[in-house]
Each structure stands twice: as structure tokens, then as C-alpha cells.
Image (tube, helix red, strand yellow):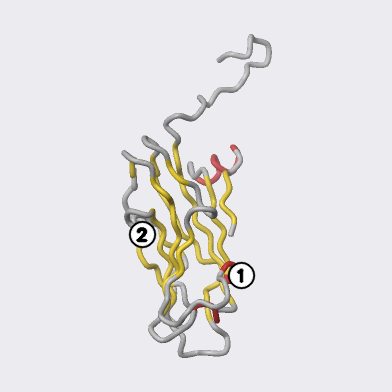
């Protein structure tokens, strides 16, 4: 799993998204029990500070998830939110090839989740009843996120022949 900021060019090309979370079946640890979801939070995704806000998110399923040895394993869901509301931004989107996978989730409304207390972003992978998500051996997705830091440095660039202040 990789969560990283986008370059200025990528931010401009993406319509304002500032970060990208890449997730693959390789990020699912072995040994998860049947009927058990997996949550990635601290250590994988950033904590948000007071006054930070998430303006929008999008989920893009590059390769649907599946267990190649079990065609009856037909539901795997991806949710993206925070420790308070696990589905705040993306709500249990079907990501399994044997189900009815949703390739692109673009929430209709702008999120504008303003944090009045610190919050931990998290990704949740949900499993079908009586199935083991550790058995998934195919799948890749990415989530675009627009995060604004209230206490961040001003977005300034030096002028070519000036004092460096704009």
C-alpha cells in the first residue's frame, strides 16, 4: 500500500486531487480469519489534524479483486473513511470480479469533511460470509483524495526577478 502526495502537475491534471492511495491484493496479510474484515489505518494512512478537510475522493478499480481458486467468492467491498466513520467517503463499494464490481466510484456530492478533532484515515476491505480475504490473489485499486491542511505553508512561488515573495 502506498499513500503519497501528487506533484503540482498531477494535481492540475486530476482536477485538484492532492493525494493518491494505491492498494493491491499483495497488501492483504496472510492468516485473516473467515468472515473478517481488514482495516488499514495508522502506519499506512495519515492522521488528519484539527481544521484539515477532505474536499473529495474517488475510487478507481484497476483490476477487480478475486480468489482465482474460488468462483463462489463473489463479494469483496472497499470502504474509505476515518476511525469515526469507516464509510465517510467511499461506502462498501463492490470490488470483486465474480460479483458486480464497480470500476469507478465518484461520489456525487463534494465531501468537505472538516475535522473538528484529529482523525485517522482508514481503508476497510470487507469479506463475503464464510470466505477468507487472505485468499484473494488478484486485484488492484487506487483512491484519489483532495486534502487541505489548515496549518500548511502558503502555496507561493518565487518570482523570476523579484525578491522571492509573490
Q: Nearer the viewer, residue 84 or 21?
A: 84
Q: Mark 2 — residue?
A: 86
The residue lying at 59 percent from left, 37 percent from top is 8
Q: Can residue 157 be seen in the rendering of this structure?
A: yes
Left or right position of 20 against 109: right
Tell which circle, 1 or 2, labels the residue nearer the N-terminal end: 1
Residue 124, x across and y down, in percent: 43, 64
Which image quadrant for residue 29?
A: bottom right
Q: Mark 1 — residue?
A: 26
Can you say whether 111 is above or below 26 in the image? above
Assign a secondary structure to mark 1. helix
Residue 93, x across and y down, in percent: 39, 68
Assign a secondary structure to mark 2. loop
Quadrant location of the C terminus?
Answer: top right
Q: CA distance from mark 1 to mark 2?
A: 22 Å
Can you say whether 67 is above or below 78 in the image? below
Which image quadrant for residue 9?
A: top right
Per the rendering, the mark at residue 74 is: none
Left or right position of 164 against 31: right
The residue lying at 57 percent from left, 58 percent from top is 22
Can you say whether 4 is above or below 127 in the image? above
The residue positioned farthest toward the top in the image shown: 163
The residue lying at 54 percent from left, 51 percent from top is 20
Can you say whether 54 is above or below 106 in the image? above
Amino acid at each position: 500500500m502506498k499513500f503519497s502526495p501528487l506533484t503540482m502537475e498531477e494535481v492540475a491534471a486530476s482536477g485538484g486531487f492532492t493525494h493518491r492511495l494505491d492498494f493491491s491484493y499483495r497488501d492483504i496479510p496472510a492468516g485473516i480469519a473467515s468472515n473478517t474484515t481488514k482495516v488499514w489505518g495508522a502506519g499506512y494512512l495519515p492522521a488528519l489534524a484539527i481544521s484539515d478537510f477532505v474536499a473529495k475522493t474517488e475510487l478507481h478499480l484497476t483490476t477487480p479483486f478475486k480468489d482465482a481458486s474460488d468462483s463462489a467468492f463473489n463479494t469483496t467491498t472497499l470502504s474509505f473513511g476515518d476511525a469515526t466513520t469507516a464509510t465517510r467517503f467511499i461506502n462498501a463499494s463492490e470490488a470483486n470480479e465474480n460479483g458486480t464490481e464497480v470500476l469507478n466510484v465518484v461520489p456525487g456530492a463534494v465531501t468537505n469533511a472538516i475535522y473538528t478533532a484529529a482523525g485517522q484515515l482508514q481503508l476497510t476491505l470487507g469479506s463475503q460470509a464464510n470466505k477468507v480475504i487472505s485468499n484473494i490473489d488478484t486485484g488492484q485499486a487506487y483512491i484519489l483524495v483532495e486534502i487541505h491542511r489548515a496549518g500548511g505553508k502558503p502555496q507561493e512561488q518565487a518570482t523570476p526577478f523579484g525578491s522571492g515573495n509573490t
